[in-house]
Amino acid sequence: MSGPNRPATGAETIAFTFDGTTYHARPGDTLAAALLANGVGLVARSFKYHRPRGIMTAGIEEPNALVTIGTGGRAEPNTRATDVFVYPGMVANSQNRWPSLAFDVASIFGLAAPALGAGFYYKTFFGPAKHWMLYEGFIRRAAGLGNAPTEADPDNFSQKAGFCDVLVVGSGPAGLKAALDAAEAGSRVMLVEQDAVLGGSLLRDPDPSIDVAAMVERIRALGGEVLLRTTASGYWDHNFLTLTQRLAEPGAVPEHGFAQRLWHVRAGRVILATGLIERPVPFANNDHPGVMLSQAVRSYVRRWGVLPGKRVVIATNNDDAYLTAEALVDAGAEVVALLDARASGPAAPAGVTVYHDARPSSVTGRKHALRKVTAVICGSEQSFDADLIAVSGGFVPVSHLHMQAGGKLTWNEEAQAFIPGETPQACETVGAALNPLPAPAIAPVGKAKKSFVDFQNDVSLADIDLAWQEGYRSVEHLKRYTTLGMATDQGKTSNMVALSRLAERQGVTVPEAGLTTFRPPYTPVTMGLLAGAGARNAGAHVRRIPLHALHAAHDPIWQPLGYWFRPRAYPVNGESLAEASLREARTVRTLAGLSDVSTLGKFEVSGPDAAALLELVCATTVGKLAVGRGRYTFMCREDGFVNDDGTVWRLAENRYLLTSSTGGADRMAHHISYVRNSLRLDLKCSVVNVQEHYAGIALAGPKARAILASLIGAEPPRHMGYAPGVLAGVPVHVLAASYSGERAFEIHVEATHAAVVWHAIEAATRVEGGAPYGLEAMELLRIEKGHVVVGGEVDGRSTPHDLGLGGMLNKAGGFIGAAGLTRPALSAPNRNNLVGLVSLDGPIPEGGMLIQRAGQSPQGHVTAAARRILEGGAIALALLQGGHKRHGEEMIVTSPTRGEKARVRVTSPHFYDPAGERYRD
Amino acid sequence: MYQITCPHCGPRAQTEFTYERTTDSVVDPAGDAQTAMQALYTRANPMGLDDEIWRHTYGCRAWMVLTRHRVTHEITAVKAIGPEALP
């Protein structure tokens, strides 16, 4: 079968569907070429006004023919029909129409166009809020492109690093020559082409003197890499480029595992042979199916053997469109008229009538094509029966990558075009982009309201005029107000037309009107490609704690913490998380529990200046510690805010162990390294990060001391003491520190021997009625005890004073953060201070706001909510303005997002054993 | 993405490195608050070259000073700092 625009040759072997109808394509057809061959001109509805749209271009710049390709999780919305190659069984669907493409209810918006013009969104924002509420639902339903698939994308995406001496972008005559020259000169070459076929403009305008196949064969023979269906989409610093390579067409099942590949390429030199994009011509209804760029018409005729129209009008301001006339005549089409806006032009093919000083003013159309073209010729109107108009308003050098590289542009008045100039990177542009044909500025003659500039965002000349009338002078403001150039095509066909209009309105030259910024990506990029393997939940490497397998045997509830997973609770007999954690916490309070704390940050600092280094890093004193003693400590940033906290222990005369939070360990490692290796090179000490060298086991509870004594065969150290020991035949460090509020010990052991030690402690603990406890029980215990946690109360905005730690600061100063802390604002009375909250009714909502009465601005927030472990009753920790002086005050905790509320009394954050009698000797 | 020539490892991608600060924003822990805050918050940011402290965190972990152009991002010099700088 063949469509009306291409005679059947038997090559139409590929069946595909568009909106449910089956059509046939030839190998090598883009969807656009296949649709045109089958006489399908109407393929889309526009974004805002739902106007009927067809195929305007033959390349990636296509603004109109956006379709959804594929089904289910593989569906790819907003794909340009000109940038997808038909494969057997391809399912394509039009977008933004209801109930059907041909009869679309929302197209009445076109009638309401005056109300929906430029700045419509902005104006609704400035109106009463209730108006926006009214418009919002309406706009969200009506405006838009294709729908993102709701199912997960089954495809895999690959990422690959590439290196080359010369990267050539574009395989037209200039790119091929540059790549071959570089390869012959001995350079490692990468040649990338976004099309499925090499040749660029040669596919439209063949040149018998250029043998593409031979050139490519030679480039490959010299070791060059040639990548098809690959778009250089981003040009970053130091000649780093991202390439997006399609390994399968949209919606297709990939043959070799990956749908697309993202290349990260570092190139010695970059050669941009990116060519030109043709400029459309503004006239009334210039967005109708049947209005096509002149070079696109030539491509369809010459490359695909498709005649997009049988009676064609050509409108141009340059010589190139005459070649289109020739191609059409050769292919048997009738060129009804060639409208040249200039006073003179080259010779036209025989039988083609050329009109000079002739500009199109409007077209009228049928469903899939045009009916009539009206032009102003030497000042008077004349109409032509035609089904297609091929337009050329000049040429725009593709300078996107050049500009992303930080390049400059020079203005070519003759061509009305910006030409790529210098860049600060090792990058040059070659070929047609440097030499666009002369194409004078032509004033449009059609009705501005229906003369579209940005087809994808439905921006007309009238919208640009309106923005200008309303005072938008800068091109950046014009862009934001009208949304011009902000659609998925990033204004590839519209920016220069709009800029010319703005310059004309302002009475300045185009370069004076300015340009908007070119940003990556050059063409839309699938999110899955950027995520790569990370899309399968492998964004960060999961590390295993040494005892992971041992915990797994208990089948705990896991919780991600830093890079690791740690048991959150060990439920037994079908307990819920809340039940299990409460049981575990009660066991710690009354008997004993053991917990894995292996992920704590741990740094061993040794050398004669070890104490001096620690006194820089820690905001508390360290040097006064006796050997075998430790203390709680915290670290500040240079601005005085608390950065992390932990404990510091003097293991030997010149040897210390510093611990930090799990999540802050990387940050501390970097900070300590900065202090040691950049700030104070004079200090004689070494720092070793032993975070994963040691596994840590906490043993806590009234019976902890007796259990440990029996295990190590000696009296354990008293509170905040350190002692080396041997447990189950394994050397261990015993640190007597309590996070839970009970008598407690941290036993640190080389990771490889941790299991033996855990088993011994667990067995001895279970004999005493104890059990392992997880992070949730630890949270209950520390909240009741009033201990802060990094990431909770230590939120980067709290000072030592805010957290009630001010008394521990090293009075001698000299630590990092000491200077910052002297700023008056850091000790202002209304700062957020750590307080406790006791509920006077129900549970306290986590994250709730603290207020005195309804309607008031929040005066603080809940950082951690829990319950008393033994007695019951809700408690919480909170940061409250001036909280240190507000103990006893009654307040309300409200969480509008959860719809929960509680009356609370502000208290000290230490709910349990404030004097520490349970662990002190 | 920059390409940074580590004095120890040679040219490597920026993703292996961590930016620390400019050399003129190094705070002397023994200094006064005003000088410290000036270094942290009210630094000049002129066009042109700039000395910055970086670390090859996901490589050899050494510290270095990069001389980098604030506009073009060109890196004109990399010097090792710390004991690693010793011959």
Image (spheres, helix red, strand yellow):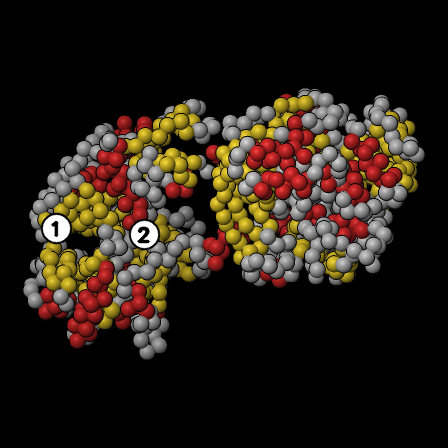
Residue in the image at 10% along x and 49% along y: A652
* Amino acid type indicated by mark 2: Gly
- Residue that label 2 marks: A663
Q: Nearer the viewer, residue A281 or A548?
A: A548
CA neighbours of label 1 inside 10 A, class few (<14), some (14 to 19), many (20+): many
From where the camera sits, is residue A893 visible? no
- Residue that label 1 marks: A651
A377 horizontally vs A721: left or right: right
Q: Which chain carries label 1?
A: A
* Amino acid type indicated by mark 1: Leu
Q: Which residue is farthest left?
A: A714
Q: Nearer the viewer, residue A95 or A419?
A: A419
Secondary structure at numbered mark 1:
strand
**On the rendered image, what quadrant is the N terminus of chain A found in?**
bottom right
Instruction: Choose mark 2 or mark 1, whichever is in front.
Output: 1
CA neighbours of label 2 inside 10 A, class few (<14), some (14 to 19), many (20+): some
Q: Nearer the viewer, residue A675 or A871?
A: A675
- Residue B15: percent from the left, percent from the top? 41, 42
Secondary structure at numbered mark 2:
loop
**Residue B7 versus residue A757 in the image, above or below:** above
Residue in the image at 38% along x and 34% along y: B5
